[in-house]
Amino acid sequence: MTSTSFNPIQTQQNALTANQPLALKQGQVFHGTIKQLYPDQMAEVQVGNQKFVAKLEVPLKAGDAHFFQVTGTNPQTELKVVTGPMAQTASPSQQINQLLESMSLPKTPEMQQLLGHFMKAQLPISKDQLAQAEIWLKALPEDVSKADALQVIQKMVELKMPMTNDIFQALMSGQKTSGMTTIMDNFAQLLAKDTALPEALKQNLMQQVQAIAKPFEVETGSLMLARAIQTLTNNAATISEKMQTLALLKEAGIVPQQATLQNWATINDPKATQPMQQAGQVVQTILATKPENASQLIEQLKLWTANQNFLTNEQKQQVNQLIARFSQLPVTKQTLDVFAKQMQEQLLKAFAQNTADRLFTQDANALSSKEHLLSLIRQEAASPLQNEALMRSLVKSSVESLQPMIQQMITQADALVQNSMDSKAMEHALKTVLKNLGVSYEATLNSKSADLQMIAHQLKPQLHTLLQETVITPPLKEATEMLMTRMNGMQLSSGENGHQHQLVMQVPLEFFGKKMDATLQWNGRMKDDGKIDANYARVLFYLQMESMKETVIDMQVQNRVVTVTVFNEHTDMQSLAEPLKAALKMGLAEKNYQLSGVFLKPFDKTPADKISPVVEQREEQSGVDIRV
C-alpha cells in the first residue's frame, strides 16, 4: 500500500449532528426525507441526523424521500421538490439520474460521482458548486484519485470556503503525505542556478532553505565553537593549533580580524548595567560595578550561579570559590577588573566543556550553551537569529578549511551530534524546521510579542516576496508556487469545528544524509478555557523513510491511556520494536500517561480509516529510521 494522502481523523461525512444546526442557503440541493406533516404545508424534514421544519411548495406524503432545493430562507426555510418521491427500491443511480434530469445537469461520470458522494454524505450543495466541482474532477492529474478530490470538495462545501481553484489546489496538495522533500529539493536546485534574482534575496532564501535542510547544523557549529574555545584556553595546545583555531573563528566572523591569542576574548567596559542572564552579562556586570556596591554584586553572582543549570555542581563550587576569594580582597577598580577576567576564563572553560552534554538544552532564560559562549567572547550583543547565522558560518568555514586539524574537529562534531539523537533532538528538529518554514506566519503577525525580524527571515514570507519579482524565471516561479500551495494547504487542512480542533503539519526532514517526509495530523478537543484537553487526542504520523519506507503511526489517547499502532510492511518490525516498548512506557509515565499497548500491523490487514501518531523519534545506525 502506498499512502499518498490522508483522510480526516474525524471525518465529517455526517456533519449534520443534533448539536450543529443545519445552515441552508438559497439554491442548495440536498437529499432528505419527510418525517412529519403539519398544517399550512409545513413539514419536518430529516437530512442525515439533522431535523428541521420547512415550508413545502406542494403537499407531500410522510415517509417519502426526495431531492429538495432551497428556494428561500427568510423568515422561514422554503423548499421545492426537485425529483419525485424516491421508492425504497430505487437505486442510488436511478435517484441521481432523476435529479440530473430535473436540474438540467449533464449526466457525466464526474457529475454522477459528485451527486452520489454528497447524497451519501447528506450534505447540501448548490448547482454552481456542482458545476465547478465537475470541472476539477475532469482535470485531475493521473496521480490524483477522485476519492481524494471528492473529500477536498466536501471540505470546501462544509466549511463554506470559496470554490476557487487556488483553494482547491492548496487543499489537494495539503492533504498529501509525501512529496514535500521533493518539492523543496526542486525549489532549492532552481534557486541555486538562478542568476537573475537580486543577490540579497537569493542569499536570504538559500540560507533559509539550508536551515530547513540541516536542522542540526547550528548544534554542529555549537560543538565547533566549544572545541575552538577549549583549544584556545588549553595550555597544552601548541601555538600552531591555537593560530589555526583563531583563524577559523575570524573567518566565521565570531571574533574580530584584529584579535590575537592574547586578547581574542576581551570584553570592553560596558556603557550601562545589563540584566544578568547570559554569562557575558555576568562579566559585564562585574566590570560595571562600583567598589561601594561590591556586596550587592557578590549576592547577585551567587544567585546567578545557583540557578545556572548549564554548570555542574563541581563547576558551581569552583565559581563560588572564585567569588569567595574576591570577597576577601579590598575592592577597587583594579580588583574588579582582575575578578572579571578570572570569571570570564572560568565560565568559558565551563560552558565549553558542557556543550556536548547539553546540546539540546536551554536554561531558565531560554538560552543555550552557544549563546552563553558567544556572549563571553563577543563585545556586541546579537539576536538569536544572528547567533544561528554565526554557527552556520562556522560550520561552512570548517568544512571548507584545508587544515587537517579543523577537518578532524568538524568530523568529530558531526559524530557527536549524531550520537546525541534522542527525543529532545527530534523535538528540536521539528520545531526548527517548522519555525523556518513559517507556514502560519500570518497569524503570528497579530501577536504583540511577534519578532518581526525573525518572521521576515522565515521561508514563506520570503516566497511571497520572490513571487513579486518581475525577473523570476518561469521554472523558478512554478516551483515557488508549488511550495506555496503545499504550505497553504497545511493551513487550510487545519482548523476547528466547535470544540474539535485539527492540525496538519508536513515536515521535510533530513538527518545525516537521510531524507524523509513526515506528516503529522493531530485531532483533539478544546476545554472551556480555550486550552487543549491533553486527556483525549488522536495523532497520525505518516512517514516516508529510506530504510523502513512508508510507515504510519497511530496514537490514540483516551483519558490519558495511550494506544499506539504502527503500520508498516517491514518483516522485522516486532523484533526491532520490542526493546523500545519499555522506554516508551516509562517516557509516557513521566508525563502521567499510561501505555495500553503497542500494536504492529501491515497495511493490507487494516481498514483505511484505522490509521493514526508518534510520540518519539530517533535515527538508528542499523538502517532503521524511527524509534517509537
Image: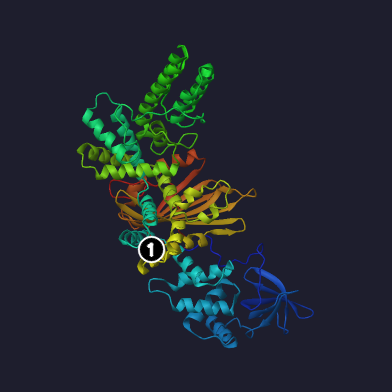
Residue under the image location 60 percent in, 48 percent down: 531
Q: Secondary structure at mark 1?
A: helix
* Residue that mark 1 sits on: 604
User: Residue 383 appears in which quarter of the rendering?
Assistant: top left
Rendering colour mode: rainbow
Crowding at label 1, few (<14), some or many (≥20) Cα neighbours within 10 Å?
A: few
Q: Position of residue 276 (x, y in %)?
A: 50, 29
- Front one among 370 and 613: 370
Q: Is residue 607 visible?
A: no
Q: Position of residue 6 (x, y in %)?
A: 45, 63
- Above or below residue 417? Residue 229 is above
- Above or below residue 375? Residue 110 is below
Q: Is residue 213 visible?
A: yes
User: Residue 82 appears in which quarter of the rendering?
Assistant: bottom right
Residue under the image location 47 percent in, 11 percent down: 330
- Above or below residue 206? Residue 425 is above
Taking the view exactly as shown, the residue that stands out farthest to the right is 39
- Above or below residue 210? Residue 301 is above
Q: In which quadrant of the rendered image does the N terminus lie? A: bottom left
- Front one among 110 and 26: 26
- Front one among 208 and 602: 208
Q: Position of residue 384 (x, y in %)?
A: 44, 42
Q: Position of residue 545 (x, y in %)?
A: 34, 55
Q: On the rendered structure, is 126 left or right of 282?
A: right
User: Residue 408 appears in which quarter of the rendering?
Assistant: top left
Q: On the rendered structure, is 37 left or right of 608?
A: right
Q: Amino acid at mark 1?
A: Asp
